[in-house]
Image (cartoon, grey):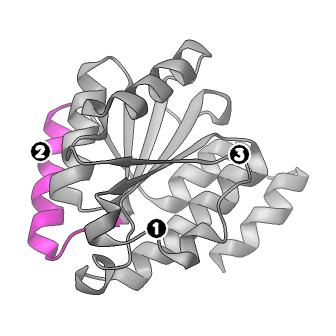
Amino acid sequence: MLLDAKRSHLIVVDLQARLMPAIHEGETTLRNVRILLEAANRLGIPVTVTEQYPKGLGATLPTVQEVLPPDAVTLTKTTFSAARDPAIAERIATLRGSGLNQLVICGTEAHICVLQSALEFRSMGLDVFVVGDAVSSRSSHSVNTACARLLHAGCHWVTTEMAVFEWMGEAATDDFRALAPLFR
């Protein structure tokens, strides 16, 4: 199954100031999240940002905030799974009701909030795509373990480039000309 921009919704999980310094390959993760956000903005893909207990972990990083689409929605949570937060679950359900049944997930930590969110949204019948090079944890072992578990549960493990090129679908477009340089 390919990603389709007209059926996709991007959720950015917990890229917060006090957490990111401890994240394995955090700079690479942030670079890829920024690419996903620029593509989502260009292609009109809705974006939801979650913040896990911002009083303790801080707000979403400014480097992420600066590339958020103007209509992106940021919601705070204390549940590890975004699916268990009523406001986030309602937003996802509303978007799903509009035909957006592909949920693309990036952020941290892969083995906690990303994993629990992906598993629960998958159990709700959404097609879940976790962007492997745009998720991370404090250790690479945790990311690898999350990947194995998510694949076993029927989630899709993709890369940033896979997601963006599937969203675009073809090369002979203004969108391709605008987004392709992000990968050079």
Q: Tell which residue pokes out farthest to the front in this image.
A: 55
* Residue under numbered circle 1: 60
Considering only vertical position in the picture, is 103 above or below 101? below
Region of the chain picked out in magenta, as a range: 135-154
Residue highlighted by disc 3: 71
* Residue 23 in the image: above or below residue 48: below
Is residue 19 magenta-colored?
Answer: no
Mark 3–mark 2 Cα distance, whole angstroms, equals 33 Å
Q: Amino acid at mark 1?
A: Thr
Looking at the image, which residue is at 55% across and 13% down?
97
Percent coordinates x, y for residue 44 in the rendering: 74, 42
152 sits left or right of 95 in the view: left
Residue at the image position 38 percent from the left and 70 percent from the top:
16
Q: What secondary structure is found at the residue carrying circle 2?
A: helix
Q: Residue at x 55, y 37 (%)?
A: 9
Cβ–Cβ under 8 Å for marks 3 and 2: no
Q: Quadrant of residue 137?
A: bottom left
Is the residue under label 1 in contact with that under label 3 (CB below 8 Å)?
A: no
Q: Would you name the residue on which mark 2 appears? A: 149
